[in-house]
Image (cartoon, grey):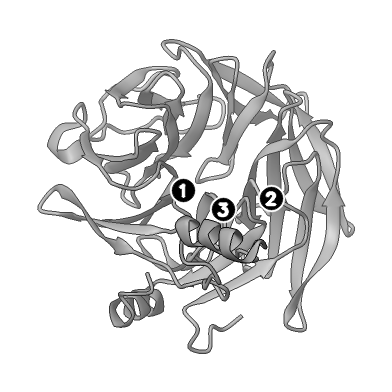
Amino acid sequence: MSSSGVPVLHWNFGIGPITCHAWNKDRTQIAVSASSNEIHIFEFRNGEWQSVHTLSEHDLPVTGLDWGTKTNRIVSCSQDKNAFVWTFDKNVWKPELVLVRFNRAATYVKWSPLENKFAVGSGAKLVSVCYYEQENHWWVSKQIKKPIRSTVTCLDWHPNNVLLAVGSCDFKCRVFSAYVKEVDEKPSPNPWGQKMPFGQLMSEYTVGGWVHRVAFSPSGCRLAFVSHDSSVSFVDSTVDSQKAQNLRTVHLPFTTVEWITENSIVAAGHDCSPVLFVVSQDILKEVCKLDVPSATKSSSVNSALQLFKNIDRNNAAEKVVVALKTLHQNRITQILPHSGTVGNVSKFTTCGTDGIVALWDLKETLEFCRNHPSLV
C-alpha cells in the first residue's frame, strides 16, 4: 500500500456510507460499518481489498467499532442497545454479548489502552465501563451516570488506562475516573487529579454545541475536542486542568479529531477536508487544510445564473457536475492513526458518508498543499 508519490490513496468498498472503521495490528485488515447492522472485514490481497468476513449479530445499525491490536479482539456497539466482543477462533469471528444495561441506543465504544476493559456511550445519558469477570466468564459493566444530562456522543481513554474523557449533547466535555479495582492497579496522581475512585468527575468544560469527538494527546496531559459550533477546544492539564481554550473557526462543524504529535492535531467533518492545527506557546492555531482535489472538479456551468441564462436561451438544461473540489464528497465521520508511532503519526485514515476510506501521508500531503495552494 505504498503511496508512490501520490499524497492520498483512497478506496470505495461499495457498501454505502461508512460511519466508522477500525484497523488490525499490521494494517492488512480493516473493519467497516456502513450504516447497517453488519460489520464488513476486508483484507488487502494482491493489491486490492477483498471481503473476508461479515459480522451480523447486531439487529440495528452499528454505531461504534474498535479493534484491539494487543488482543486482536473487536468490540462493537449498536442502536439495538447491545455491545459484542468478537474473538477470532478457527477462522471464525465469535461474538460474546456484553451486559451493558442500556435502555437506549449505544452510541460509541472504545478499548482501554491495556485492552482489559472498554467503555460504551449511550443515549441513556450514561457510560458503561465493561470488563471481563473471570469467575462467571462474562463481560459485566459499571456505569457512570452523574452529571451527564444528555446522549453521550464520544469517548477517549487516557494513556494511564484509568481516566476517561466523555463528550455529550448537553454541550459538555467531561473527564471521569474509570478505575475498576477488579482489573486495574491503583492509579498514581497526575495533573488531572489526585484521588480517582470510579465515577469521580475530574474536570468539566462547556462549549457552544454538542461535542462530536474527544481525544487525549499521546502523553495524556492534553485534551482536544470538537463541537457543533465549529470550534476546536484544547486543555493543557499541566497549565490548568479546569480551563479549556476554545478556537472558533470559519469551517463547517468538525465531527472528528485526532492527535498527530503532542503539539499537533487533525480535525475533519462537514467541510469534507482534514484541517491541521498546532499548539504553539500553549495557544491552539490553525495551520492549513489538508486536501487534494477530486478527479472531477470542473463544471460545464460556472454559476446558477449562467445555468438559467442557458435554459432561457437554448430552451434546454445543461448537465451540471455537482462534485466537490475535495477528495471526500461528503462528511468525514472518523480519523484514525495508521502509520508511525504514538506521538508521531506519519499516516492517518479518514472515512466518510461518501463511502470512501482515504489514507493520508501527512508529509506528502503538506508538501502538495504548499505547492498547489490554489487547488486546496
Residue located at (46% from left, 26% from top): 178
State the separation of the CA atoms marked 3 and 1: 9 Å
Q: Amino acid at mark 1?
A: Gly
Foreground pick, 250 / 44: 250
Is 37 in front, or is 305? Answer: 305
How many discs appear? 3
The residue at 69%/50% (across/down) is 17
| Residue 261 in sight in this render | no
Q: Which residue is mark 2?
A: 17
Marks 3 & 2, CB-CB < 8 Å contact = yes
Location of residue 144 with respect to 42 vertically, above or below? above
Label 2: few (<14), some (14–19) or many (≥20) C-alpha neighbours in 10 Å: many
12 or 23, which is in the foreground? 12
Can you identify the residue that label 3 sits on?
330
Find numbered disc 1 in the image and state the secondary structure of the residue it sits on. Answer: strand
The location of residue 239, given as percent across then percent down, is 13, 38
Spatial CA span between label 3 and label 2: 9 Å
Which amino acid lies under the numbered mark 3 shown in the image of this protein?
A: Asn
Give the labeled residue for mark 1.
269
**245, above or below 353, in the image:** above
Q: Pointers 1 and 2 in contact (CB under 8 A)?
A: no
Q: Which mark is in front, 3 or 1?
A: 3
**Sequence-earlier tag: 1 or 2:** 2
Which x, y percent locates residue 11?
A: 66, 69
Mark 3: few, some, or many residues within 10 Å (few <14, many ≥20)? many
Q: Quadrant of the N terminus?
A: bottom right
Residue 140, by quadrant, is: top right
User: Label 2 amino acid?
Assistant: Pro
Q: Is 292 positioned to the left or the right of 317 in the image?
A: left
- Image location of residue 176, percent across then percent down: 39, 24
> As displayed, is residue 325 above or below residue 47?
above
